[in-house]
Amino acid sequence: MVALLGGALAMGVAASSDEKLAPGLSVAGVDVGGLTPQQAIKAVGERAASAPQVTVTAGPQTWILGADQLGWHTDAGTSVAAAEKVSAARTLIERVQGMIGQEQPQDFPLIAAVDPAAARAALSSLTVNLNTQPRNAAVAFNKTTLKYALTTRDAPGRQYDAATAASTYAATPTATAVQIPVREWKAQYTAEALQNHADQGNALMRPFGATLDGTTRKGMLTPLQVANLYWVRPQGIVADEAAIKRAFKLLTEFIDQPAQDARFAFKGDKLVKVPEHGGRVTQNAAYTAFRATVLDPSISSMMLASKKVNPTLTAAQLPDASKLTLIHTGISTYYHSSPERRTNVANAAARINGAVVPAGGTFSFLANLGGITAGNGFVGGLIIADGRTVDGLGGGVCQVSTTVFRALYGAGLPTLERNQHSYRVGYYEPQVGFEAAVYDPGLDLKFGNDTGGPLMIKTINNDASSTLEVQVWGVKQARTVTVSPAVILARTAHPAPKYVVNTSLRPGITRQVDWAADGYNLYITRTIKDASGVRTDKTSTVYKPWQAVYEVGPS
């Protein structure tokens, strides 16, 4: 027995030096006992376990994938190494037992590993469309509600961290769930901040009045006119400097009370002198106060600083009317005008009648008119405003400004300001393009007086024959003026009519509220011959094609 045991021990030692794995050992159910580690690795690799299912979660998204799609693979070498380690650590008794068939069976699990780079690439591919930049909130003016409101709410940016998730999974390859962490960050402009800006913009949108110091004259800006003075932007309220300056100019032109030069008035056929009057106008420094106040929602009215202005022509300076001669006459007709239009023509002609322009001075139609207001006797009539022919105060005043234009233009006086109508108006035919539009405030008709002496304007209105004459009287001139007929460069046909539902009309009723007119591109010229020589100038006009508009009752 001793001899046998000694032989067995000798054999055991010999076996261990051959590096074979102990009998009874298996890896993932594969018998590796008696195999070399290389033989065991090959045997285990051929019986590799199938990849488990892994649930991947990123925010609200979930995917179920085979682990091999995430870089998972079996590691037969590491698994066999565990069996190899146990074999090497056997005691003498355990070796003998193995030799005589009394070994202790032991199964080692198949160890898996994850390639971090492959896992990262796979997880990045899954989340590539989930990564987003933050979305800013947006605000805009709603043309229906006439208020500023949010149009887009903000959303945070999201970046899914595939690298961290891959590293975590590689550290625990047996995991069956992988959570991809996400980093979020806020948008630069949030809905909360923009709503605050919108509230400020809406608070600014209020009626705003201005009174000229020392007068009772008050001008008003409507809420929408105030709204045109600024924008609501993501960074806050942004003033429109150009619009504020225009509003200030229009407002002051309305409330200013310019000095009234002395003039003539006709009492029958007799001329009488009308004395001058001082005026009061806005100081230039008032703009700074206006800008600050109109953009302060807590204030709805203000007093503008004013200054006195003196007339440039006194009664004592009026010329001797008996020494003035007729220089030129402008004529227009206004057949088929409404009673309201005739009232305004007569009123405007009377206010211009007797106006005097000193030598070297400037004739301003609006200044001599004194403002198109109800207080000055003007009534409602059709005017052109905002691309439509609509009811408005003073319709028919342009009949007078057009006739004044014809008189002063035909007299050869230098044109300083002349504005055209938007479309070709039948009242001023057949002298197409030979007209002038005015609007209070903003659009004036101005001529300079280069005759070397004073000028007087005389109007003759004949309502019965629907004719208006404007005469220019002054010192006798040695100049001749020839005005050409219009040269039409292009003509554009008017668009098809537009039909608008008016719920106040009965069903089936149709009413025309605007009339079609073709568009034109044209010019007129005048040739002036006087002591300085011969010169020609051009007055261009571009009429828009105008659309007929019909209101219809609801169907």
Image: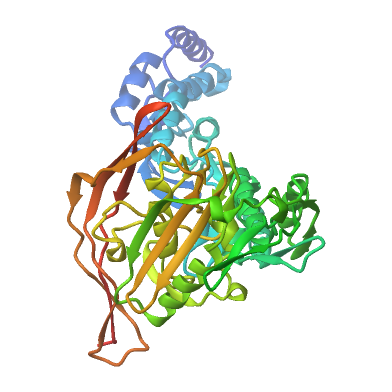
Q: Is residue 482 above or below residue 388?
A: above
Q: In this view, does 485 lie above or below 125?
A: below
Q: Is residue 155 visible?
A: no
Is 518 on the left or on the right of 381, as rendered? left
Q: Is residue 391 above or below residue 384?
A: below
Q: Can residue 8 be seen in this view?
A: yes
- What's the residue at 71%, 61% (across, down)? 275
Closer to the camera, 61 or 245?
Answer: 245
Which x, y percent locates residue 448? 52, 42
The quarter in which the C terminus is drawn is bottom left
Q: In which quarter of the image is residue 385?
A: bottom left
Is 218 on the left or on the right of 60, as rendered? right
Residue at the front extreme? Answer: 322
Scheme of colours in the image: rainbow
Callout count: 0
Q: In which quarter of the image is residue 264?
A: bottom right
- What's the residue at 54%, 37% (across, down)? 452
- What's the residue at 46%, 53% (across, down)? 472
- What's the residue at 42%, 28% (across, down)? 531
Closer to the camera, 362 or 45?
Answer: 362
Is 109 on the left or on the right of 552, as rendered? right
Which x, y percent locates residue 369? 56, 62
Closer to the camera, 525 or 188?
Answer: 525
Q: Quadrant of residue 121?
A: top left
Q: Is residue 265 above or below residue 433?
A: below
Which x, y percent locates residue 233? 59, 48
Closer to the camera, 392 or 163?
Answer: 392
Is 126 on the left or on the right of 429, as rendered? right
Residue at the bottom extreme? Answer: 506
